[in-house]
Image (spheres, rainbow, N blue to C red):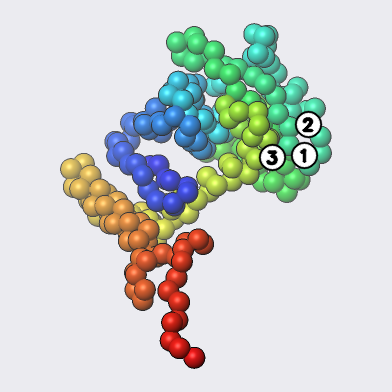
Amino acid sequence: MGLDLGAHRIDSVELTDVKGTESLERFSVRSGEVLIGDRAYGTRAGMSHVARHGGYFVVRFPWPAVPMETPEGEGFSLLDALRTLPEAAAGEFAVRFAAPDGQRIDARLVAIRKSEPATEHARKKALRERTKKRVAAVDVRTLELAGYFFVLTNLPPDVSAESVLQLYRLRWQIEMKFKTLKSVLRLGKVAARNDESLRVYVLAKLLVALLIDALLDQAESFSPWGYPITPDQQLAHDSTPA
């Protein structure tokens, strides 16, 4: 699902079976458009897809799956770089990564240290996932990396590291959208027993969601006066003589 963060409206939906995976490659990218995604979207294929179509990405990523190098082609150590970050201040590092076809994609690693409570929460989550996946041990690097928040972006350098991190925060809006779909439209409880009926049910619910978004977008044009007021709009004057 794609969400237009400016209008807070769903702008794209693709329904797949359980084998379908989230990917930036599923989205049509317009030149100059900025796509924000969580860790599931931080793949080399997806990010290179956005860059090749003239768009920009701001995504978290699973660190073992996206090997990085310096702009000169030398190895880049994620942990070594993060350890140089100052306290409570954003930092950035020029990097590049290889697309699946071997083409190098220039990017910036933007990062900041987490607070102690946020770090502790992230480490506990990593340990819970180890238990859930029945993994004998957690990589010590994973526990250390839990102390940092970092994203990859190809936004131009005039967009500061602080602005990139603030921009990523807007991604939470899609989580709120899903919460609304589940609570208001009850999309979390699908009353279907086979693939065909499930598809009809889910798409019907999403159609209702799109109609609601459209109505909310037009709400400024509803009564009592029937049009949105813009700052430079000339309103009618009272010409009644005194």
Answer with left or right where residue 166 lies relative to residue 144: left
Most distant residue in the bottom direction: 242
Quadrant assignment, res 87: top right
Answer with left or right where residue 224 lies relative to residue 41: left
Disc 3 is placed on an element classified as helix
Q: Are marks 2 and 1 in contact (CB under 8 Å)?
A: yes
Residue denoted by label 1:
89
Give the distance between the C-alpha atoms of the residues marked 3 and 2, in whole angstroms.
13 Å
What amino acid is found at the position of numbered circle 2 in the picture?
Leu
Position of the N terminus, as image quadrant, is top left
Give the distance between the C-alpha atoms of the residues marked 3 and 1, in whole angstroms.
8 Å
Disc 1 is placed on an element classified as loop
Residue drawn at x 54%, y 13% as measured from the top left: 104
Disc 2 is placed on an element classified as loop
Residue denoted by label 2:
85
Residues packed near mark 3 inside 10 Å, few (<14), some (14 to 19) or many (20 plus):
some
Most distant residue in the left direction: 196
Q: Is residue 156 above or below residue 187?
A: above
Residue drawn at x 36%, y 44% as measured from the top left: 11
Q: Which mark is drawn over residue 162? A: 3
Q: Nearer the viewer, residue 138 or 89?
A: 89
Q: Nearer the viewer, residue 192 or 72?
A: 72
